[in-house]
Amino acid sequence: GEIMNKCGMGQLFNDMASSIAGGTKGGPAKVGVIASGLLGMINGSAVACVVTTGAFTIPLMKKNRYSDEFAGAVVATSSVGGQLMPPIMGAAAFVMAETLGVKYSVIVKAAIIPAIVYYAGILFQVQLRATKDKMLGLPRDQLPQIGQVMKERGHLLIPIIFLVGMMFASGWTVLKIAFWTILLTIAVAQLRPISRMSLKDIYDAFAKAARSTVSVAISCACVGIIVGVVSLTGFALNIASAIISIGNSSLFLTLLFTMITCMVLGMGLPSIPSYLITATIAAPALIQLGIPDLAAHMFCFYFAMFANLTPPVALASFAAAGISGGNPMKTGWVSVKLAIAGFIVPYMFVYNQGLLLTDVGLLGALWVGVTAFVGVFMIGVATEGFLYTKVNFVVRVIAGINALMLISADTTSSIIGLALCAAIIVFQRVCARKETPLAA
């Protein structure tokens, strides 16, 4: 991550995001989402990603009439999502592979659809808000051209392609793949002057990585003591039993209490210790109810990451508020609203494990992917209260219920949900046409 940042891959992602989305409705916010997601994918630290991309994207959003809190929330939610997005994700994902005793490629495969759905949820809300508030994109003459961007820095995508290919095709360990990816990144960066690194640049990148590792290592050492104590004393099993008991053997209630436990335990911690604590204490409750280990750990992993967004201790949101000048607590709550699809996605893949691409074919994967996308779109409509025109309270409630129907693994429920979504779209379209003559 540090090597990729040092050679200018962060600038490549910023320019790509600007050229792709900058000219569309709500362009500055979409640039913030895409740039933060791409950088967070290789960065692994939500707060570091907020500081890096926020310095560029938050002023851009504020200049285009977005509130301080919304601008900060866009960057915070997108930066946290980078730890959920393959191929690199956060460092905690590598720990999950070790904990579960599976190849890292298994984690990558399971994470891909939920991560895309998470970002789709954010982009849907950004698009709906931009349409509602009549926010235009940036002038095309102020945006970088994708052809020029790829000509200058496109070669920096080669190491990422290599990384993904080796994960699925080589059979190498993650450490070996990472080692050769670092060497390839350094070599590829030397191909053009704009990305070329001196020996000092390479040294600085290694030094910064080492400094970052120290804080994580100290946290993990402390967490190791906690994990050892709760395991040897049986505290973890007692917590798991308590969660199941309070949930009264109801899967939904158990998931709800597990979510709360993960978010409380993850407050103020870096991603790795946050995941380790939640996986040790909360995941056994889900496993006892028959949920597969991968789904249980992914559920805990998601909500451990979302602790960075959720007040009262929301590190990523507070860091974004420091740049935007907004109220930190309000920024945290706006972040929760923007990331609402992410709070639903873990329930989706517990109830419908095809979303993790486990034991499902191509058609099955397409089906769960489509229903998930439609579900988060309906969540966006219910949250923003807009689709072509203002959505009344009753339709917002129906849209929310519709989203919940699409979470279910039941095919009949999903088909009804898709039909209901189509009805809502047609109804809102008719309402918008009726209002047009009045507006004129």
Image: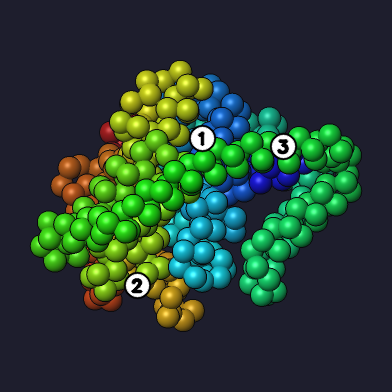
Q: Nearer the viewer, residue 191 or 370?
A: 191
Q: Nearer the viewer, residue 20 or 82?
A: 82
Location of residue 175 (image quadrant): bottom right
Instruction: Report if the CB atoms under discs 3 and 2 are less than 8 Å apart.
Output: no
Residue marked by disc 3: 207
**Crowding near the residue tagged with mark 1, few <14, some 14–19, many ≥20 C-alpha atoms within 10 Å:** many
Residue 309 visible here: no
Q: Which of 125 and 50 is in front in this view?
A: 50
Distance from label 2 to label 1 (Cα)?
31 Å
- Secondary structure type for disc 3: helix
Distance from label 3 to label 1 (Cα)?
19 Å
Residue 170 visible here: yes
Where does residue 84 sit, x and y in percent of width and height?
A: 48, 53
Q: Which of marks 3 and 1 is nearer the N terminus?
A: 1
Q: Relative to residue 382, is residue 276 drawn left or right?
A: right
Q: Which residue is drawn at 43% across and 32% down?
A: 315
Instruction: Report if the CB atoms under discs 3 and 1 are less than 8 Å apart.
Output: no
Identify which amino acid the numbered label 3 is placed on. Answer: Ala
Residue 90's place in the image compared with 73, above or below, is below
Identify which amino acid the numbered label 1 is placed on. Answer: Val
Residue marked by disc 1: 47
Residue marked by disc 2: 292
Q: Which residue is drawn at 54% across and 58% down?
A: 94
Residue 70's place in the image compared with 17, above or below, is above
Q: Residue at x 59, y 55 (%)?
A: 88
Identify which amino acid the numbered label 2 is placed on. Answer: Pro
Where does residue 18 sit, x and y in percent of width and height?
A: 63, 38
